[in-house]
Image (cartoon, grey):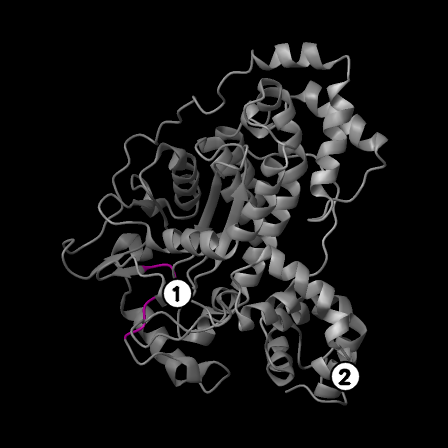
Amino acid sequence: MPNQNKPTLPLEEITPHILRYWKACQTDKKIVENLWNHYDTSHYGLGITKFKEICNEMGLLCTCKQNHLIESIHKAMVELRQAYPNAGNECVKTLYINEKPVTLSAGGSGLLVSMIYWPLTSTIKPFSGRIMWIQVWHSNCNPQLILTYYLDTIKKLGYITMVTQSNPGTENYGITNAHTMLRQMYDPALQGTLQHHWMWTKKNVKPEITWSQLQRRFTPGFETLLDEGVENGWYNSDNTLQVCAFSMIFHWVFTPWLQCELDRYQDRVNNTLKRPDHNKVLPHGVPNLIYESAEDFGALDFKVTVKQDAIDHVCNIYVKPNHPVFDLVPKPLNDLIQDCYDDLGHPPVTRQSIWTIYLDLYHSIQHSAQIPAIVDSLTDVTDSDEEPLPLLENQKDLFFHGDTDSTYYMGGIHSGHGLNASDHRQLDELAELDEPGADLLPTAPIIEEEGLVITGFSDEEDNDETYVW
C-alpha cells in the first residue's frame, strides 16, 4: 500500500487520471485509492496531503478555497441559464463545475442549416451508459461518414466491443462490415457470422433515450440562439443566395462551436452519477468509471484489443478520404471564407460573438468578385449520400437463443452462447474479493459487460435520469 515514505511518481503520469476522477466528483480519499491502479505502488506513494497539494497546483480547488461570492459567479450563472434554460438547481451546480469559457477558431467542418434539422449521430454503451460519441455534420446517412466516427473512437480506445447493435438502416452498414472484419481477424472461429445485431422488432432504446434527453436538456438554449438570427433577419432561408452559398458561411462558423458544446455535454453526462433504480440489474455509478473498471462493479471485461494496423486496413477498404461527404464546404468557398476570416483577425468564436462573426463574414463575402463563379460551381455538386455500401456476403446473423416474447441472451460471448463455467467462476471470485467496489456488487444475477439481456423494452426516460437534471 502507498505511504508517505515513498517518492511521488512523475505528475504527468497521474494528472490526467486525477482530472478524470475529479470530474466524476470522487472524494479525495477515493481518488487516491483509484490512483493506485495507475502506478507501481511498490516504488511510489501518494498520500492525501500530497494529493491536495497537486490538486491546488492543477487549480482543482475546493469550494471554500475558491472564495466565490454572488457577484463573482453572477456573469457565469447568467450565461449558463441562457445556454441551459431548463436546468435545475443540481444541474446548474454541475454545469458550473464542468463548464469553462470556451473559445476556438472557426472553420474546418460544418452543419446543415440547423433551424430546421440537426443531423446528429450518437452511440451508447448499454452496460455502462457511456456515450461513445455525439457528432453533428451535414449528413447522418452516409455509411462512410458514420464508419469514421466508429474508427476514430476505437483508435483512441485501442479496443472494440464484442458486438455492435443498431437500427436496420443502410447508414450502419459500414460499421457492421468493419466491426465484423475486426472481430474475425482476432477470432477466426467467428468466420461466417455477422458480429452485429439488428434491432428489427425492438427499438434501440439506449440511444433513443439519450437522444430524447439531449433534446430536453441541451437543445432549447441553443435553438434560442439560432432563432435569434432568424428573428433579426440575419439568416433568411427564403434568400436563394443564402440557401446556396451564404448558408455555408453559417455551417462553417457554427459547426466547430456546436461540436465543441456537444463534446462538453457528452463529457459531463459520462461523468455524472445516474439516479439509482433498484429494478435494474445494470450497475449504479458514473458511466466513465463503470466503463473503465467493470471489475469494480462485479462484471467481467470482454473488450477486444485491436492494433492500429488492423484499423488502418479496414479504413482503407471502406473509407475514401476524398469523398465529398467529408467536405461540408466545397474547397473554393472554404478558401474564400478562410481568407475573409483571417482578414477579420481570426476572432475567437463564443456564444456571445458567433452571430457577429457570421455577419462580418457574410458582408465580406457578399461583395467578393469570386462569389458568382463559386455559386455556379455549387450546382455541380452531387448528392454525397447516394452511394450505398453493401453488407458483407455469406454472413449469418448473430446467434441468440430464446424467443422474442421472453428474456433471452444477445451478445458476442462465446459466439453468442453466453457465459460458460469458467466465466461464472471468475464472477464468483470477483464477488469474494474484498477490494474497493466490492460493496457495489448487485444482488441480482450478474451479466457480463458486452452482453445485453432484454426482458421488455420501455420508452420511459425517467429510468435513466441523473441526479443533476
In the picture provided, is 343 more to the left or to the right than 362?
A: right
Q: Looking at the magenta stretch, what is its main secondary structure?
A: loop
Q: Position of residue 421 (x, y in %)?
A: 27, 70
Classed neighbour count for the residue bearing mark 2: other residues with Cα under 10 Å, few (<14), some (14–19), many (≥20): few
Residue for point 31% across, 61% down: 460
Mark 2 and 1 residues: CB-CB less than 8 Å, in contact? no
Q: Position of residue 325 (x, y in %)?
A: 54, 27
Q: Position of residue 301 (x, y in %)?
A: 43, 64
Q: Which image quarter: residue 367?
A: top right
Q: Nearer the viewer, residue 76 or 348?
A: 76
Residue for point 67% across, 68% down: 19
Q: Is residue 312 above or below residue 205?
A: above
- The outermost residue toward the front is 232
Q: Which of the image's four quarters has the N terminus? A: bottom right
Q: Which residue is mark 2?
A: 50
Mark 2–mark 1 Cα distance, whole angstroms, equals 37 Å
State yes or no: residue 448 in magenta.
Answer: yes
Q: Secondary structure at mark 1?
A: helix
Q: Which image quarter: residue 365?
A: top right
Residue 63 in view in this figure: yes
* Dot 2 amino acid type: Lys
* Dot 1 amino acid type: Asp
Q: Position of residue 320 (x, y in %)?
A: 54, 26
Q: Nearer the viewer, mark 2 or mark 1?
A: 1
Tell me where the magenta segment starts and ends, as one range: 445-451
Q: Nearer the viewer, residue 427 or 124?
A: 124
In the picture provided, is 53 more to the left or to the right than 42?
A: right
Q: Which residue is mark 1?
A: 464
Q: Is residue 219 above or below residue 5?
A: above
Residue 60 in view in this figure: no
Classed neighbour count for the residue bearing mark 1: other residues with Cα under 10 Å, few (<14), some (14–19), many (≥20): some
State yes or no: residue 184 in magenta.
Answer: no
